Amino acid sequence: MEKIEGWILDLHPGHAGEMTIWVKTREGSCLQVVDQWYPALYVAGIKDDLIRLTRRLEAESSVLGWRFVERYTRLEDFNPSEVLEVTVADGSRLRSLAQELLKLGGYGRLRLYNVDVPPEQMYLYEKNLSPLAYVKASATQEGVSWELNDSPESLDYELPPLRVMRLTVKTEGKRRVESLQDIITQIKAQVDGEALELRSGSEAERLLGLVEEVSRRDPDIILTRGDSFSTLQFLARRALVNQVLSRFVLGREPRPFPPSLGQGVSYQSYGRVYYRPRSYQLRGRVHIEAENASIYHDCGLEGLIEVSRTCRMPPRRVVNTTIGTCMTSLQLYQAVQEKVLIPWKKYEAEAFKTAWELLLADRGGFIFEPKPGVYDHVGEIDFSSMYPYLMWSRNISPETIGCSCCPDSKLQVPELDYNICEKRTGIVPKVLRLLLTKRSAYKRMRDEAQEAQLRRRYDQRQAALKWILVCCFGYLGYRNARFGKIDAHIATCSFARSTLLETARIVEDRGFEIMHGIVDSLWVRKLAASRDEYKDLCKAIETRLRLPVSFEGLYKWIVFLRSRVHPEAPVLNRYYGVFEGGKVKTRGIELQRSDTPRFIAACQRAMIEVLAEAPDAEGFRERVPEAVKVMERYRALLMTRQVDPVDLAIERRLSRSPKEYAHNVVQGVAARQLEREGLTLSAGQSVKYVIIDAGNPNPYRRVLAAELIEPDTGYDIYKYVEMLEASASNLFPFPTNADHKVDCPPHLAA
């Protein structure tokens, strides 16, 4: 192999003992590099047990060899332990071999490590490589020698010349909803600004025509829409029906889609059910389902590349996984560099706590309750990434909290008797240093950039890193986190509460009044204060607490809203206001909720635009009647049926599969309506429906799935008027005539 230079676009296991790497060159071609590489797992236990195990390994055909090495089995260890390193000839046998080893050890005497790390990621860790970073590769007697001429810490790095193909599919449209049984009538693709259409011939010829175009155009990224099912899943299904699946190859390797096409996966996280469509790997290319790839959807291609580089994960895996998995990858890389083994199963349980200790320790962030009302001259103060900065600056990590080496440490957790290690920096702070430093630099570069394209680039990168930072805190207390520990999570919350209380003292000492405070943000007020005084206050807080603080701005007015159930009580996360520059900020109100119909959200937005013209709180009150008139105009459109039912669709997430609903809840009914049309839905997917007749005794006549709307479809006027009036009244912290309900004529409500 001659010397190759370029960017690692993709890598995956090849034949047994091989890793295939795809390198994108400056000239635009993508070259395949095959390296000899064997993964290894590690076994810890009593030395005699390990020696006996080696005798049994001789009969294992998948074992290439073994040796005793020194590694750290726990983050807390100062000295390495002697463990057994077992090299596996075929990486696909790694997990099954691990199960056999556990069985041989009686399931209790042996502990296994480095078992379930994806092989392509372990290859990157061991070779100290990063995807989409510039590398040089050359052949040696031991395999491929890599030279990394870039760094994941770089900020203004050079991007590879990626070619993107945008792919859309049209069907014959005989069904009212799209399904895997529809016949493809047209395939559209766009590459480098050039559009092409495949519509002639049979369906099989159109599918094979796509294969030819992909081979000829040679894209690096194939971008599809994605929604209820994967576009590639649909194409593969039609290829199977047309008996051309064996020739339907869209990757850079001649590897067709599997004949058995399964469904996606439903899973639960933080009390909510999510759905992840089945991913289809195109070896040598990156396939992105725009609607289902969260990082790409939120942060664009720049954010996707940044996460791939920083977390050392192939972009193909970044697209199809959660941000928490990406963050974990960065921790795993750090562990491999420090020769710390990665546990297959968590062996350390949470330390016992009494009821009093739990009451004292297991609390969240601090809250200052607002008083419902509209106020002017309020300034907003935000801590930038407070929790990650606390974890970094206070050295909070699973192995540093309550360490045995520093019982008299000067670093103590507020309110609790936890000590923090002074002799070493934890793995979590080490990871956070890179993330926080890069995000801070990107935000500065974004603000200083003169070109809109550069501002967008740096903003997408910092936004992607922000999501990783958010996960770093959550994973400290996640029961399945590789390097998680609930005591570290508790310690971070304790520092956060102490920080907000100390901030409150500084605020009050300078004559400011706290209007509201929630976890890492404060709204403060001093009627005679200038903007410079607010900024000086931020500098004083930043100096005293050693945490970055930003002054978000001064509000012309801000509204803290009341509870709908208990009007005398405030709602912590529902407010909106207008800064002096005219920027509107809204949190928790209807127009931000995904289940709010577009029509009602548009009404609320129009009302706020009218209120935004007010210069202060008094002006806000004077403009309330004008805002109510906006609502009345929208209400008139509803009552005269001038609203498109599509704009009244409500979106809800399914908490279970449609057939598992015991009661006729509206989202379950809408899902069953879609299933009757041939669409298969799973828990975690969303459905949209329109309320047709809320009071109908037949649940299937109360709502209609949005995909089934016809030109003559009606809607329940009374129900939508009720929702509209409720959303309008929710904007005001005091009674208005928007709170008065109107009677809807019976003939219009029908």
Image (tube, helix red, strand yellow):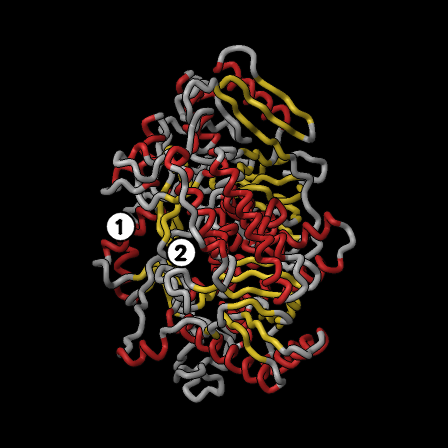
Q: Nearer the viewer, residue 107 or 232?
A: 232
Type of amino acid under label 1: Glu
Residue at 44%, 68% in the rendered image: 570
Residue at 50%, 11% in the rendered image: 202
Q: Is residue 502 visible?
A: yes
Q: Classify residue 544 by image quadrant.
A: bottom right
Does residue 167 lie above or below 626 as drawn?
above
Residue at 60%, 87% in the rendered image: 509
Marks 2 and 1 in Cβ contact (< 8 Å)? no
Location of the N terminus (image quadrant): top right
Does residue 666 lie above or below 732 as drawn?
above
Left or right: residue 208 compared with residue 93: right
> According to the image, label 2 marks what residue?
114
Using a 10 Å C-alpha cutoff, classify the residue at mark 1 as few (fewer than 14 neighbours), some (14 to 19) or many (20 or more).
Answer: few
Residue at 32%, 27% in the rendered image: 676
Badge 2 element: loop
Q: Is residue 145 visible?
A: no
Type of amino acid under label 2: Asn
Q: Residue furthest top?
A: 201
